[in-house]
Amino acid sequence: MSTHYTRECEQSQPWAIIIFHKAAALKNVNMPWRVALPRKPPSQRIHPVDNPIQRLPRYRLRNMLSSAARTLLRLLFLDLAGERHILTLHTGYAMSTAITLGDETFDVEHPVVVERLYEAVVSGAQAALILRTFTTHTSHTEPGGPNIPLKQVRGWRLDHGLLYPLDEAQMFDAHCTDSASGEPIPPEPGVEYTAAPAVDLSELRR
């Protein structure tokens, strides 16, 4: 994975934390979205870079997704375009994974993130989910560097096994409002904040 792609993973996590904790910047959001989950002790946290499973070869990791996790990804990406994505999950702490879509396949860099998302869905936990999609359009070119693709950023809140899509205004407010002062901050370069589609997860409960 390129340095730029890795940096995108790292940049996605703070925004998931903001969306999870800073409900004041989001309009017309139900009260359960305003309640932050207690943080787990460090010894109980799972993070992709700390998990020994991530030291296995990529081709083995791809095959280690459970069938339920694969079904969840299929439902999530059903109405979304693009091949390269970064999925960030926040359930009290943030974790991210790069996902590449193929012909009816998912190449997942850190399967533990998707498995944790599935656990959050079936347990009814509260969580925030952000998806960055790399488009085929160029946003800008870094000085002396590569062309930077335009990213579409969308998000959902998870509560009681349902994904509630956030609209464009909610995503913009969450990303472009300082969580401490409430003052506006400039949008991230090369990013288009967009509304998330509805995702039907009823298949997971059959």
Image (cartoon, helix red, strand yellow):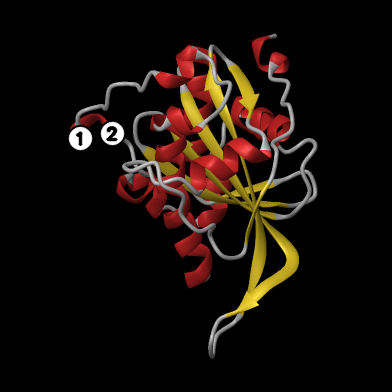
Residue 2: image tag: none
**Outermost top residue:** 206
200 shown above or below 76: above
79 relative position to 47: left or right: right
Q: Residue at x 46, y 49 (%)?
A: 184
Q: Residue at x 66, y 17 (%)?
A: 204
Considering depth in this image, is 149 or 104 the residue closer to the camera?
149
Circle 1: residue type: Pro
Q: The C terminus appears in which quarter of the rendering?
A: top right
Number of marks in picture:
2
Q: Residues within 10 Å of mark 1 (few under 14, many from 20)?
A: few
**Outermost bottom residue:** 144
Considering depth in this image, is 70 or 61 the residue closer to the camera?
70
183 shown above or below 203: below
* Figure quadrant of residue 145: bottom right
Q: Position of residue 195 (x, y in %)?
A: 70, 38
195 shown above or below 62: above
Residue 156: tell me if it is visible.
Answer: yes
Q: Mark 1 — residue?
A: 42
Q: Residues within 10 Å of mark 2 (few under 14, many from 20)?
A: few
141 shown above or below 175: below
Report helix, strand or loop for mark 2. Answer: loop
Report helix, strand or loop for mark 1. Answer: helix
Q: Position of residue 103 (x, y in %)?
A: 80, 49
Q: Position of residue 158 (x, y in %)?
A: 54, 23
179 relative position to 193: left or right: left
Considering depth in this image, is 91 or 55 the residue closer to the camera?
91
Q: Mark 2 — residue?
A: 45
| CA separation in Å, label 2 and label 1 | 5 Å
Q: Are marks 2 and 1 in contact (CB under 8 Å)?
A: yes
Q: Position of residue 53 (x, y in %)?
A: 39, 45
Circle 2: residue type: Arg
